[in-house]
Amino acid sequence: MTTRLAQAADLPAVAALFDLYRQFYQQPADAALALDFISQRFHKAESVLLVAESGGQLLGFCQLYPSFCSVEAQPIYVLYDLFVQPDARQMGAGRALLLAAEALAQAQGKSRMDLTTAKTNLTAQALYESLGWVRDEVFLTYTRSITALA
């Protein structure tokens, strides 16, 4: 298994994984929306996509969004999406993607990476913690839907 930056030719396969990722978080399947969203982020260079592959087949992906930490006055990455095909889990693809993201962040001078996951996603939490990620016990996260205001 290898990890690498995604290329334009990978977008349909990454989008299929992204659609499954969205379904994991209770969103309806929508292959066209997934392809459009992933393609837009890629072509506008708004995110960084890493993929894990074996035998020419993509096993998983992660998507990083560049951001900043105002308190540290430093650039960071937000690791927003991480997904591994269900039949490829327990093969180390998630771990490999996280390590590749960390290496990329370090090479690009990011001060840290942040991520959120579902409270019920205990498998992912165990992986993050095994790699030294620390659960935030200081700050609470809030969201506000802007589309609901319309």
Image (cartoon, rainbow, N blue to C red):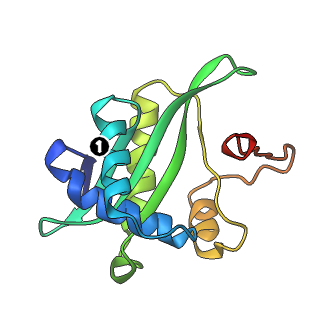
Q: Residue under circle 1?
A: 39
Q: Amino acid at mark 1?
A: Ser
Is 33 placed left or right of 64 in the picture? left
Residue located farthest toward the bottom when viewing the structure as drawn: 87
Residue located farthest toward the front when viewing the structure as drawn: 150
> In the image, is residue 50 above or below residue 53?
above
Question: In terms of depth relative to the viewer, which is nearer, 106 or 86?
Answer: 86
Where is residue 26? Give x, y as percent: 57, 71
Q: Residue 92 lies in what quarter of the image?
A: bottom left
> In the image, is residue 95 above or below residue 65?
below
Where is residue 52? Give x, y as percent: 29, 60
Is 78 placed left or right of 16 in the picture? right
Q: Residue 97 lies in what quarter of the image?
A: bottom left
How many numbered discs sit on the rendered protein?
1
Q: Which residue is at 58% across, 28% downward?
A: 111
Question: In terms of depth relative to the viewer, which is nearer, 142 or 113?
Answer: 142
Q: Residue 88 lies in what quarter of the image?
A: bottom left
Q: Secondary structure at mark 1?
A: helix
> In the image, is residue 110 above or below residue 150?
above
